[in-house]
Image (cartoon, helix red, strand yellow):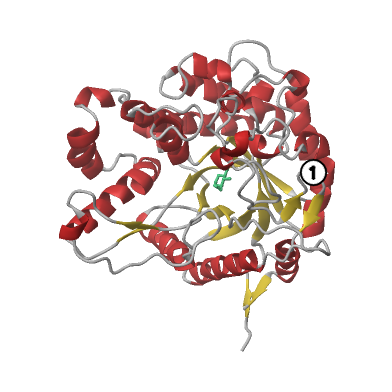
Amino acid sequence: MTKNLDFPKKFVWAVATSSYQIEGASDADGKGLSIWDTFTQIPGKIKNGDTGNIACDHYSRWREDIKLMKDLGVDAYRFSIAWSRILPKGNCGLINTKGLDFYESLVDALLEENITPFITLYHWDLPQALYELGGWPERMIVDAFAKYADIVSSRLGDRVKNWITHNEPWVVSTHGYLNGSHAPGHSNWKEALATAHHLMLSHGLAVKAIRSNAPDAKVGITLNLCPAVPASNSHEDHQATRIFDGEFNRWYLDPLFKGRYPADIINNHLKKTRVSENDLDFIKDGDLAVISEPIDFLGLNYYSRAIIRSDEIPDNQNAKPVVLCGEKTDIGWEIHADSLYQLLMRLKNEYPIKSIYITENGAAYNIGPDKNGNISDTKRIHYLKEHLSAVHRAISDGVSLDGYFAWTLMDNFEWAEGYTQKFGLVWMEPETLNRIKKDSFLWYQKTIHDNSILL
Ligand code: IFM
């Protein structure tokens, strides 16, 4: 039996992208280098030696991309600004007006089509010049980011009413400064923790800067949150799950919404196992008050859950796992829509959050065109359907969830995976960069049109 799930009238249907993943034009019109421009040049860092030098060439083809979005029927579009297009040398040196002009044209054209722009200020492409001054582990970066936020919002704040300071600070800290799989490729606990702190502190200052230029704007931050479950009922697996949750989720949620770091993680874990007392001296008096500046919405990126197995004891001494990993997408992430529902309910019950947007959700399926040129990505449709059902259920159970941004409009540069992992609703023809709509595009188009999913 089929059934319709209708969404609230004002529900925002949208798609998201990010600058380095789609723009290309890595040195056009006065743009400075970013850490991703340099990291992708290091042999062995990115699959197939791929780079974002050309990416989807959105910098030239943005009009075509807006047409695609118009055709899709979205209410909103989330994109990020490349900091080094605006300030090629970070915060010292001239503002590159051509960079600002580019984003202004994009914003004006979106508004003309009735597509609401959501700007993300930082989606990982730090100006190389700021990295050379010490980057995120150094406190100077906090003022540099606030200044950049001020420059962009003073130019666009009269038209852009939705702002996201950072995208996924956990990824910047963990992949950039702890396991080194992302730019700038460091592996150092103290740097990773300082990076996370400075990202959050700079977020608080940027909120104020944006509001002073656009008092009627809604400002938020996007976190990637990952619900965790113990693999077994053992004490060790439960402990490991609490720590995982503390480092991954509470480390960002608690400062933002409770004005403090999670004490169990600071005292019983980090100081005992990772760093010394002095290593946390980057946290200064008053910082948490800045970080917890009230925000208008939380952006939530959700892809999967984590099943946690302790490594404190040998596996054969631990209890038998009872939670097993289910089906995965092509990138190897488990599909678990119910965890999205549980996460949304947890956010509602544990944190004073005014409004939530799902700012990213989607799946990597790498299927390409068949001999007739059709792209039957039915597995992505299934993934989106299941996750939107979870969203619908959460809304029915009282979560203030105002919109959903599918990740992503078109196949693009997937960081260390290069172009091997395809999350797009639109296929990017490798040689020509022609855009071809996948079946999931047509499905999302109908969903948006009906404001409803058919199960
Ligand atoms: O492509 C990324 C995006 O840049 C940030 N969130 C996760 C996506 C899929 O890995």
Q: Is residue 260 above or below residue 72?
A: above
Give the residue at the far top of this rendering: 93
Q: Would you place residue 397 above or below residue 129 in this image?
A: below
In this view, the residue farthest toward the bottom is 1
Helix, strand or loop at label 1? It is loop
Residue at the (24%, 36%) spot, across then down = 270
- Within the image, what quadrant is residue 156 found in? top right
Q: Relative to the observer, which residue lies in front, 285 or 413? A: 413
Q: Residue 80: tell me if it is visible.
A: no
Which quarter of the figure is the C terminus placed in? bottom right
297 above or below 318?
A: above
Q: Residue at x 70, y 68 (%)?
A: 447
What's under tag 1, amino acid-wise? Leu
**Which quarter of the rendered picture does the N terminus lie within?**
bottom right
Residue displayed at 36% across by 67% down: 324
Q: Which residue is mark 1?
A: 433
Please provide percent x and percent y for residue 267. Answer: 19, 38
Mark 1, other Cα within 10 Å: few <14 / some 14–19 / many ≥20: some
- Residue 128 position in % (x across, y down): 57, 19
Location of residue 288 (image quadrant): top left
x%, y% of residue 296?
52, 46
Could you say which is closer to the camera, residue 131 or residue 154?
131
Q: Is residue 17 left or right of residue 186?
A: right
Asked whether the viewer can see residue 379, the reply is yes
Counting from the top left corner in percent of width and height, residue 268 is at 18, 41
